[in-house]
């Protein structure tokens, strides 16, 4: 086996070894066999391209093209041209699958079902990483940087699974070391005869490097020893250092005592898929339950509580103690006094087979939880949550919950005594990185409040009613210490923004606060049950008041139900017809209004974007951007600005060429004659008496093509199987044309039939004006959105992609004829000759 082939095989093996870490993410592992086969084909193409030899960049391009063809055959064959070549429909199918795959990743828990979309993400990702590794290690002969894409592939698996088994890391590391060893062996082979030195060991040291020539030479043995030592250190150091016990080789959320009383819960990120769930076009059912209470508006199903605030994010405190099984009954909730009214509620819950969550959704506070069947469930008393251990999830689970419906009065909350010192210390922590505007805004909003309860109600009302905030799931979540300050300034976001911000502002006022994540009560069904869908995912703040315990608030506008104890009672003499001060919570979320502010990151401060500091003297300094950077930024900006308008510009150019005046390419007498068209407007005739018949037919067909493409832009697909008369009737019917526009469409179709079938075609008249009349009728009958799309993103621009596909097919045909191959061979021979001379 030659050095190049050996190196290519090692690169493919290292990629597959790193891809093995993705296996636990899905429930079936057949996809990796498919990925291995496609990767082998891609690698073989690279080997053949390098033996031709092709230029390095061309080799990578050929491999990328083959990978695209392979993915087309496997995932979009029905949409391909000839079942192989990718066209516009193939890329549209890939886009749809990628969107579905991103949705499935956010919706399903691990292990996720192996849907076609997820399989495309896995197989396509392996091929892309394999191509990068092969290009770096084999084509460009630099194996060391190839470890970065391998690490990225492993890191994706470790991040999605919140850690992965250390054996997969060992396999990926071994594959990378094998790749380095193969590259080193190949480099040594190019040096010729290598001697081991010392002269004391005759025989092996004198053999040339190659198979069957005796023991391994000293440099190769040394490389193996160094690789083994480095791998051992990489595995042992995280195990012996106490500060790295939640590092690369240990899954997040596990502890050595998992499953026992001495275990703990780890940090979780339950908000990763919350925004994706709210953006889903379909509200998929995740839970269905029956309950004994009629007051279902307060029956929120809580999954987990987030009580650790680091200034930018909220998360669950790690290391909380757990018990092996949920106790029966559960301990009494903290802070709940006997004088507060509570009603017992019995709820039976059934989770769907597609909903797999580690935490069990429960009403708060639960007193008793009975889970059907066998399972590995644990109880964490601080957050009063039930969490699965050792892979236990809610998929298909059924359970019964006895909970309390706590109904404190406003007077009881207003007269609540001070919380215990432990709660104050733990749940009012605010890092110094939080911008001062957060506390300043909290004090301003709650000015005049007599107690913490009134402060909490004022905060809720400010977010939900008085502050001018809008609910918008399309707003970027944001991160960093300035995230809350940016939200308070933009006043647009969804439940995560509102709950995070209110909890943080409550803490600045000295009120113990945390964030709860779960579901709103759902939708009543005809059979008396309640259906909870993915769009019911929600986050809300919980504030602590002694006597009532952790108390729910609802600052998010148009979502959920505000608790009764936060809504002011209507005075007896109030006008019943007066509008309510609080908007209807059952209303649909308001539509997005404007994109997020362009001033993001550290550049955006509380008072806006600061101006650039001027250098003394106003002169340029070495700290300014380089010319290359400026050029790259300007080029990128031009690309971003120009690309969206290319379809519109192309359509205008094509329309102008198709509807050009008669004889525009000639400059003879009598060609500027004008005639009256429909409506008395002067136009140029499409065919003049002295026109060439062939050119007249060509212009007639061009006008017909423009008419059908204009209809296509407004959503009427062309059908070349119909006669021009039937096609025109279809356009008139589908486009709701009448009067002059319908008559113009018929006249253009008649002119086409004359041009195609009449022995002596008659002059066609002003076809350009006829087409413009039809376009005006289509535009008048279409809605505003259809008119904008017809101008900015015309559907007929797909002909560009079709033309490129035809040219690509023609290029492949020329390749098969051997002319280009012969040129490549001559170029390859000249290149080899130049290398020998060098």
Image (cartoon, helix red, strand yellow):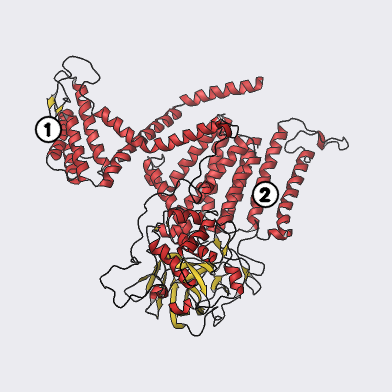
Camera-side residue of 255 and 311: 311
Which label lies toward us, 2 or 1?
A: 1
| Image-quadrant location for residue 560 | bottom left
Q: Quadrant of the N terminus?
A: top right
In this picture, is 108 found above or below 647?
below
Q: Residue furthest top?
A: 669
Q: Secondary structure at mark 2?
A: helix
What is the CA distance from the residue labelled 2 to the residue labelled 1? 78 Å
Q: Point out residue 309 in the picture as x, y percentages from the top left corner.
A: 57, 62
Name the side, left or right, on which 690 lies relative to 650: left
Q: Do the CB atoms of the residues marked 2 and 1 lie less than 8 Å apart? A: no
In this picture, is 251 found above or below 360?
above
Q: Point out residue 138 in the picture as x, y percentages from the top left corner.
A: 61, 37
Q: Which mark is residue 678?
A: 1
Can residue 2 be seen here? no
Camera-side residue of 14 and 446: 446
């Amino acid at each position: 086996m030659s050095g190049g082939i050996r190196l290519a095989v090692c690169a493919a093996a290292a990629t597959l070894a790193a891809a093995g870490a993705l296996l636990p993410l899905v429930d079936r592992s057949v996809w990796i066999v498919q990925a291995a086969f496609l990767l082998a084909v891609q690698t073989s193409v690279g080997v053949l391209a390098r033996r031709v030899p092709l230029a390095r960049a061309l080799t990578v391009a050929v491999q990328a093209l083959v990978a695209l063809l392979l993915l087309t055959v496997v995932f979009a064959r029905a949409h391909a041209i000839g079942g192989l070549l990718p066209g516009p429909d193939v890329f549209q199918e890939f886009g749809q699958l990628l969107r579905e795959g991103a949705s499935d990743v956010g919706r399903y828990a691990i292990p996720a079902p192996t849907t076609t979309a997820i399989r495309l993400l896995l197989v396509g990702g392996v091929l892309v990483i394999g191509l990068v590794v092969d290009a770096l290690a084999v084509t460009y002969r630099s194996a060391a940087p190839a470890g970065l894409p391998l690490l990225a592939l492993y890191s994706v698996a470790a991040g999605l699974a919140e850690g992965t088994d250390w054996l997969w890391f060992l396999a990926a590391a071994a594959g990378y070391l094998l790749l380095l060893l193969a590259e080193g062996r190949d480099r040594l082979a190019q040096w010729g005869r290598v001697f081991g030195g010392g002269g004391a060991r005759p025989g092996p040291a004198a053999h040339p490097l190659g198979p069957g020539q005796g023991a391994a030479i000293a440099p190769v043995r040394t490389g193996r020893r160094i690789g083994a030592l480095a791998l051992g250190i990489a595995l042992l150091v995280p195990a012996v250092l106490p500060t790295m016990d939640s590092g690369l080789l240990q899954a997040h959320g596990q502890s050595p005592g998992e499953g026992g009383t001495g275990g703990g819960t780890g940090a979780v990120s339950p908000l990763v898929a919350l925004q994706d769930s709210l953006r889903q076009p379909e509200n998929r059912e995740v839970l269905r339950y029956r309950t004994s209470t009629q007051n279902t508006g307060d029956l929120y199903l809580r999954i987990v509580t987030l009580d650790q605030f680091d200034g930018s994010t909220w998360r669950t405190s790690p290391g909380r103690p757990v018990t092996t099984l949920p106790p029966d009954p559960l301990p009494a909730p903290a802070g709940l006094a006997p004088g507060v009214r509570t009603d017992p509620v019995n709820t039976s819950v059934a989770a769907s087979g597609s909903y797999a969550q580690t935490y069990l959704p429960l009403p708060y506070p639960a007193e008793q939880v009975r889970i059907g069947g066998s399972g590995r469930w644990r109880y964490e008393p601080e957050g009063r949550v039930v969490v699965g251990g050792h892979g236990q999830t809610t998929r298909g689970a059924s359970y019964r919950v006895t909970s309390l419906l706590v109904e404190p009065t406003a007077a009881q909350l207003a007269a609540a005594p001070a919380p215990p010192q432990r709660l104050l210390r733990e749940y009012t922590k605010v890092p110094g990185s939080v911008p001062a505007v957060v506390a300043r805004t909290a004090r301003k909003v709650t000015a005049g409040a007599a107690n913490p309860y009134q402060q909490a109600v004022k905060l809720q009302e400010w977010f939900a009613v008085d502050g001018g905030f809008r609910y918008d799931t399309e707003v970027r979540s944001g991160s960093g210490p300035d995230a809350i300050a940016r939200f308070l300034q933009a006043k647009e976001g969804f439940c995560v923004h509102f709950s995070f911000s209110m909890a943080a502002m409550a803490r600045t006022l000295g009120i113990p606060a945390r964030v709860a994540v779960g579901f709103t009560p759902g939708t009543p069904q005809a059979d008396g049950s309640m259906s909870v869908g993915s769009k019911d995912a929600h986050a809300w703040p919980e504030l602590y008041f002694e006597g009532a315990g952790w108390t729910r608030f609802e600052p998010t506008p148009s979502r959920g139900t505000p608790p009764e104890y936060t809504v002011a009672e209507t005075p007896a003499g109030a006008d019943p017809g007066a509008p309510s001060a609080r908007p209807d919570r059952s209303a649909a979320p308001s539509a997005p209004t404007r994109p997020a502010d362009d001033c993001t990151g550290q550049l955006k401060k509380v008072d806006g974007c600061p101006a650039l500091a001027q250098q003394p003297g106003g002169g340029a300094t070495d700290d300014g951007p380089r010319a290359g950077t400026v050029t790259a930024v300007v080029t990128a900006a031009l690309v971003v600005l120009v690309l969206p308008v290319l379809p519109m510009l192309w359509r205008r150019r094509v329309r102008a060429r198709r509807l050009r005046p008669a004889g525009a390419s000639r400059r003879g007498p009598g060609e500027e004659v004008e005639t009256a068209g429909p409506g008395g407007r002067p136009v140029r005739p499409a065919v003049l008496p002295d026109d060439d018949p062939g050119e007249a037919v060509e212009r007639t067909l061009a006008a017909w093509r423009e008419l059908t493409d204009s209809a296509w832009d407004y959503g009427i697909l062309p059908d070349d199987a119909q006669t021009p008369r039937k096609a025109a009737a279809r356009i008139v019917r589908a486009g709701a044309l009448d009067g002059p526009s319908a008559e113009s469409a018929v006249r253009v179709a008649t002119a086409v039939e004359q041009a195609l079938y009449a022995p002596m075609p008659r002059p066609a008249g002003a076809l350009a004006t006829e087409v413009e009349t039809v376009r005006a009728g289509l535009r008048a009958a279409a809605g505003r959105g259809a008119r904008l799309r017809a101008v900015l993103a015309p559907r007929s621009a797909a002909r560009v992609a079709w033309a490129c596909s035809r040219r690509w097919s023609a290029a492949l045909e020329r390749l098969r004829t051997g002319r280009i191959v012969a040129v490549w061979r001559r170029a390859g021979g000249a290149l080899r000759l130049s290398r020998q001379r060098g």
